Amino acid sequence: MEVHPLSFGRYQRNASISALGKETSQPEPGSTTTTHVGGFEAGSTETYPMVELKISIERDLSVLEAVMDAILHVHHYEEPVIFLREDWASRAAYNPGSDNPNRWWNNGRGLPDRIA
């Protein structure tokens, strides 16, 4: 958040986080794992919990550089797996007073329960 507000429309700090999954790798000789984990044998498979995080930023190289630098600085892996994609994203005609019956404030169900 120090380098980008992760804006999406009139909302800040927007991200999508997947359900908990697993990631695996086989560290090679001279990797950080074989260097810092006593007794780890190069080529052995290691599996850890993971989630997939998706964010959206504007198409601006200086913004991308700042965001990537921040991620690489704070991530606990020396080489996190990061995929960059250029996609189309939705942009609504923002109207909090809309009478569209499908919107959460009109459908009688309201928002889903917050998890955090």
Image (cartoon, rainbow, N blue to C red):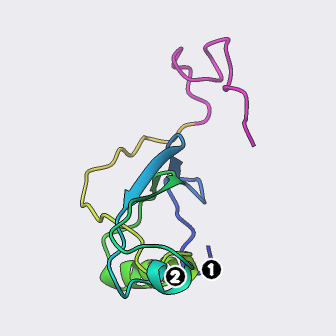
Marks 1 and 2, the one that precedes in the sequence = 1
Question: Which residue is denoted by mark 2 in the rendering?
Answer: 70
Relative to 106, is 54 above or below?
A: below
Hey, what amino acid is under mark 1?
Glu
- Residue at 52% across / 40% down in the picture? 19
102 above or below 46? above
Magenta: main secondary structure: loop
Residue at 51% in and 17% down: 102
Residue furthest out toward the top: 108
Residue drawn at the location 34% of the way across and 66% of the way down: 26
Q: Which residues are magenta?
A: 96-116
Q: x, y percentage for residue 107? A: 61, 13
Taking the magenta stretch, the answer to whether it contains residue 104 is yes
Asked if disc 1 and disc 2 are in contact, CB closer than 8 Å, the reply is: yes
Disc 1 is placed on an element classified as loop
Q: Give the quadrant of the N terminus.
A: bottom right
The amino acid marked with disc number 2 is: Ala
Q: Nearer the viewer, mark 1 or mark 2?
A: 2
Residue at left 40%, top 78%? Answer: 79
- Tell me the residue that label 1 is attached to: 2
Spatial separation of the CA atoms under disc 1 and disc 2: 9 Å
SS for dot 2:
helix
> On the rendered structure, is 12 left or right of 58?
right
Residue 23, image x and y in percent?
Answer: 42, 54
Asked whether, in this view, residue 110 is left or right of residue 50, the answer is: right
Quarter-wise, where is residue 86 in the image?
Answer: bottom left
The mark found on residue 58 in the picture is none
- Image quarter where the C terminus lies is top right
